[in-house]
Image (spheres, helix red, strand yellow):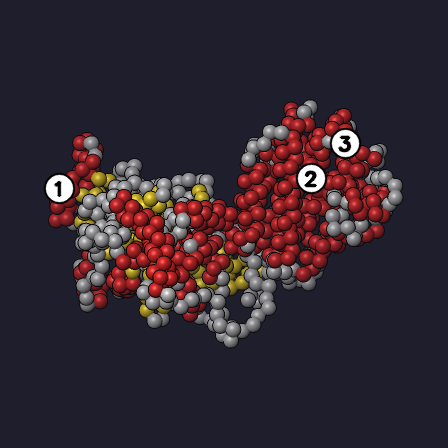
């Protein structure tokens, strides 16, 4: 027994040695920057205990397993379409996630959270005074110029008591370790703090990639924070089951993905300014069922853009009349407009005295030493040793008069530029602050099989609740690529990292799902904003349009793949397919002499608006505006289609194969919509878009290939395009004949690809949607659909000549337009005044 035990111990030691050797090697290679606080190596030069636990488990993985897990994380980000935009850019970037988390032990975290909670409470009290009694300015605790100089100080909300009782529902601070190893505040975020949604996505990705490691480290869960935040917003409303919206600038926002993630995770409606309307003392959402009351608005739009009537008149992002609704206590806005005034660096020097005045205690967490040059003594101090300071704008990130979007390091400027900066501060010091030069603390990142230190900034979030301030355990970490970075933003080549707050004890699993006995069961269709319904309708149309183009490409390419039909490229049907692709904008007239070039251009051209690639890109753009409503599986399919068609192929067989594979993916997407989407109004508009576009395309196909003198080859192409070859052969024991083919493609109510089937389905959808008028008469979309269905029901195949088919196609186009005008109103018709009585 002793021998067996000794052998077992020897084996365990042998197994541990590779991991231990890797840890020792990593530690030796870790080139810690001298004099800079580091998260891995403590002040005593030894690795911190939490990191030691992590690397002990991490080193037990083989190099191949580590790379496989990293690849899994990257693949999830790509397939889920996790993106962002750098400031000033118009194209999305893939989210750059660091493969190692930032690890903070429980004791260290408690010090951090105490300081964040104190700072959040201080800011709430300062805002209450600035927009209320104004005693801080009257008593000289804060200079009036330090407040009035900020364009975030909004006179329009002075004296307005915030509905819900708070100016700040969400606060965030950017922090790093100072020279003494303590946490220091670098920036405050009181306007509309971003990053919490990305922090959530980081956690989902990394906890899946390293699930066992994540569990063994006892990482604090983030769900309780989001639950508390959601419950706090719900409790701030004046009715039991409020409707909460997340106001986004739209799909072109730099952080739109985060807005959609939070809306989906928290169960909020994602709305834009055009989705909202003011009536009386309330805010309403424009929906396909009329106006619906909105109780709480979590805004991600800057204050000045919220109301073009009282703030920035050029804004198209806000809601006209919103400020007046706030005065009437008609809606809770989180955070209150004007809260961004506390982000001004001009106020930093006054915060310690304000903390003692308002809270009766000293600040727990210091911030960077700051001198506001609007005061004579501070200005002279900065000018006397200008080379020792980082100069920042007092009220924004940019430094007035300089092109840099971040701090200006006076000591690194050319003499002429330094003199210009000195003169600018002398002339108008109110616009500038001088800050102590600091270098960010560092954290380990994984690069080429080794760990190396990189500077980071940690954004910590605090949510106001009835029980006090709740802190998100972890936060949003940004890591610089350069070793000597002094500031980090996602536009400066940075990456993000998950943040693990670890405990020595097991943590309880948490979820946003409530207990089974705490929720009243409801079966409701839900609210669909008109904009979302519009996007769903066009998503359906783009999907069907892409499918029709791909079917044409496949029909054109099939003869070229069959050597026995090599001469068939000269047939009239081939010419008709090419002419139709030209008409649809999928290819150019110049390529029609070469069918191979036609299918290549129609499949992958980026310039042709009607090519399959352009249409799939339109699908992706439209789906981006619906991120909160689409499942991850649906988004993955869309991403795969775009990636496939973006990959250029040369030979005919590969081009046709790409078209066929994309058709299969479109079928998968249609299956997800049919089997996985709830049968509410959103699904109806998606399906209506597909049905309307399919009916139009099928009528056009019939007009092109079932014309009066059509031969067997043309009719066979039509049966292929509408996917009815098998059905036709099972019904008729003869080759394609004109009347039976027309009947099957246009009039057959049992054929799911016929025009009649689409019109009947559209009738069912329109009848199920709520009426928007109060006169009780049949509305225009239903009137057109009923008339079309009656025409198709009573028509005979023999009478379907080209002229009749063209008229049918025009009627279908008119029906699609009528649906859009009726359910997705724009301009002066958007308010739908006939529905202003009996509002929900």
On the rendered structure, is 239 left or right of 152?
A: right
Please give the residue where the numbered disc 1 appears in the rendered image.
Answer: 385
Helix, strand or loop at mark 3: helix
User: Does the rendering let one see residue 135?
Assistant: yes
Q: What's the CA distance linking mark 1 and mark 2?
A: 72 Å
Q: Position of residue 93 (x, y in %)?
A: 44, 42
Residue 719 picture location, percent across and down: 77, 41
Q: Residue at x 22, y 50 (%)?
A: 37
Mark 1 burial class by Cα count in 10 Å: few <14, some 14-19, many 20+: few
Single out the mark in the foreground, 1 or 2: 2
- Above or below, 589 against 148 in this view is above
The earlier-in-sequence mark between 1 and 3 is 1
Tell me if label 1 and label 3 are in contact, CB under 8 Å. no
Q: Quadrant of the N terminus?
A: bottom left
Marks 1 and 2 in Cβ contact (< 8 Å): no
The picture places residue 127, in percent across and down from the top left corner, at: 29, 61
In the figure, 13 relative to 117: above or below?
Answer: above
Give the mark nearest the N terminus, 3 or 2: 2
Answer left or right for 501 relative to 768.
left
Image location (x, y in percent) of residue 788? 76, 50
Residue at x 65%, y 60% (from the top left corner):
769
Q: Name the residue tied to disc 3.
A: 573
Which quarter of the image is occupied by the C terminus? bottom right
Determine the residue positioned at 40% across, 68% down: 508
Quadrant of residue 646 within the rendered picture: top right
Residue at far bottom of view: 517
| Residue at image point 72% right, 46% down | 695
Given residues 320 and 437, the one toward you in this image is 437
């Amino acid at each position: 027994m002793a021998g067996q035990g000794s052998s077992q111990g020897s084996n365990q030691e042998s197994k541990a040695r590779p991991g231990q050797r890797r840890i020792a090697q990593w530690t030796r290679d870790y080139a810690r920057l001298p004099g800079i606080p580091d998260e891995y190596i403590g002040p005593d030069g030894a690795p911190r205990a939490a990191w030691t636990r992590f690397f002990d488990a991490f080193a037990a993985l083989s190099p191949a397993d580590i790379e496989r897990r990293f690849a899994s994380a990257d693949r999830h980000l790509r397939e889920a379409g996790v993106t962002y935009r750098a400031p000033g850019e118009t194209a999305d970037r893939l989210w750059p996630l660091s493969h190692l988390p930032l690890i903070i032990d429980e004791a260290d975290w408690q010090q951090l959270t105490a300081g964040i909670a104190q700072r959040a409470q201080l800011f709430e009290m300062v805002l209450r005074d600035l927009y209320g009694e104004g005693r801080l300015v009257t008593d000289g605790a804060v200079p009036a110029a330090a407040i009035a100089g900020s364009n975030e100080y909004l006179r329009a909300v002075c004296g307005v008591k915030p509905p819900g009782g708070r100016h700040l529902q969400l606060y965030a601070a950017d922090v790093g370790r100072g020279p003494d190893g303590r946490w220091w505040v670098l920036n405050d975020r009181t306007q509309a703090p971003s990053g919490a949604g990305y922090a959530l996505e980081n956690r989902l990705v990394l906890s899946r990639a390293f699930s066992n490691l994540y569990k063994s480290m006892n990482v604090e869960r983030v769900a309780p924070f989001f639950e508390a935040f959601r419950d706090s917003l719900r409790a701030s409303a004046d009715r039991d089951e409020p409707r909460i919206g997340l106001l986004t600038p739209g799909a072109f926002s730099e952080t739109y993905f985060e807005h959609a993630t939070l809306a989906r995770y928290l169960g909020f409606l994602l709305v834009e300014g055009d989705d909202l309307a003011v009536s009386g003392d309330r805010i309403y959402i424009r929906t396909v069922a009329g106006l619906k009351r909105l109780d709480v608005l979590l805004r991600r739009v800057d204050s000045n853009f919220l109301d073009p009537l009282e703030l920035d008149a050029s804004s198209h992002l806000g809601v006209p009349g919103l400020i007046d609704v706030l005065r009437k206590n008609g809606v809770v806005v989180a955070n209150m407009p004007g809260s961004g005034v506390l982000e001004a660096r001009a106020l930093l020097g006054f915060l310690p005295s304000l903390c003692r005045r308002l809270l009766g205690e000293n600040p727990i967490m210091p911030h960077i030493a700051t001198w506001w040059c609007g005061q004579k003594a501070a200005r002279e101090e900065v000018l006397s040793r200008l080379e020792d300071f980082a100069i920042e704008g007092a009220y924004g990130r940019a430094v007035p008069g300089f092109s840099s979007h971040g701090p200006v390091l006076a000591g690194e400027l050319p003499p002429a530029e330094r003199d210009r900066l000195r003169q600018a501060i002398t002339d108008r010091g109110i616009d500038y602050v001088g800050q102590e030069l600091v270098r960010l603390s560092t954290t380990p990142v994984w690069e080429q099989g080794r760990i190396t230190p990189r500077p980071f900034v940690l954004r910590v979030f605090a949510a106001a609740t009835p029980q006090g301030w709740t802190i998100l355990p972890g936060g949003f970490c940004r890591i610089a690529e350069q070793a000597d970075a002094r500031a980090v933003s996602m536009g400066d080549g940075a990456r993000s990292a998950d943040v693990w707050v670890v405990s020595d004890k097991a943590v309880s699993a948490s979820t946003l799902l409530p207990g089974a006995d705490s929720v009243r069961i409801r079966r409701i269709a839900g609210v669909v904003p008109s904009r979302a319904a519009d996007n769903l309708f066009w998503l359906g149309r783009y999907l069907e349009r892409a499918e029709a183009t791909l079917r044409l490409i496949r029909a054109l390419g099939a003869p070229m793949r069959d050597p026995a039909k090599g001469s068939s490229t000269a047939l009239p049907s081939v010419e008709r397919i090419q002419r139709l692709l030209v008409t649809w904008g999928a290819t150019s007239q110049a390529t029609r002499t070469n069918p191979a070039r036609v299918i290549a251009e129609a499949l992958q051209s980026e310039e042709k608006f009607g090519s399959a690639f352009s249409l799939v890109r339109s699908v992706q753009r439209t789906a981006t505006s619906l991120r909160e409503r689409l499942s991850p599986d649906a988004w993955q399919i869309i991403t795969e289609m775009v990636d496939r068609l973006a990959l250029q192929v040369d030979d005919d067989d590969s081009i046709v194969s790409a078209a066929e594979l994309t058709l299969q993916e479109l079928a998968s997407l249609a299956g997800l919509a049919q089997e996985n989407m709830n049968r509410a109004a959103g699904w109806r508009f998606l399906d209506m878009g597909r049905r309307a576009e399919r009916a139009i395309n099928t009528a056009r196909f019939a007009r092109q290939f079932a014309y009066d003198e059509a031969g067997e080859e043309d009719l066979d192409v039509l049966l292929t395009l509408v996917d009815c070859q098998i059905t036709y052969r099972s019904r008729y024991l003869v080759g394609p004949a004109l009347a039976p083919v027309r009947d099957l493609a246009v009039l057959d109510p049992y054929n799911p690809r016929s025009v009649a089937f689409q019109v009947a389905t559209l009738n069912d959808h329109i009848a199920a949607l709520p009426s928007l008028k109060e006169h009780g008469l049949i509305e225009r979309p239903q009137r057109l659909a009923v008339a079309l269905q009656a025409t198709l029901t009573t028509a005979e195949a023999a009478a379907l000549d080209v002229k009749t088919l063209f008229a049918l196609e025009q009627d279908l186009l008119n029906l699609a337009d009528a649906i859009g005008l009726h359910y997705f109103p724009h301009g002066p018709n958007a308010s739908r005044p006939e529905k202003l009585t009996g509002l929900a």
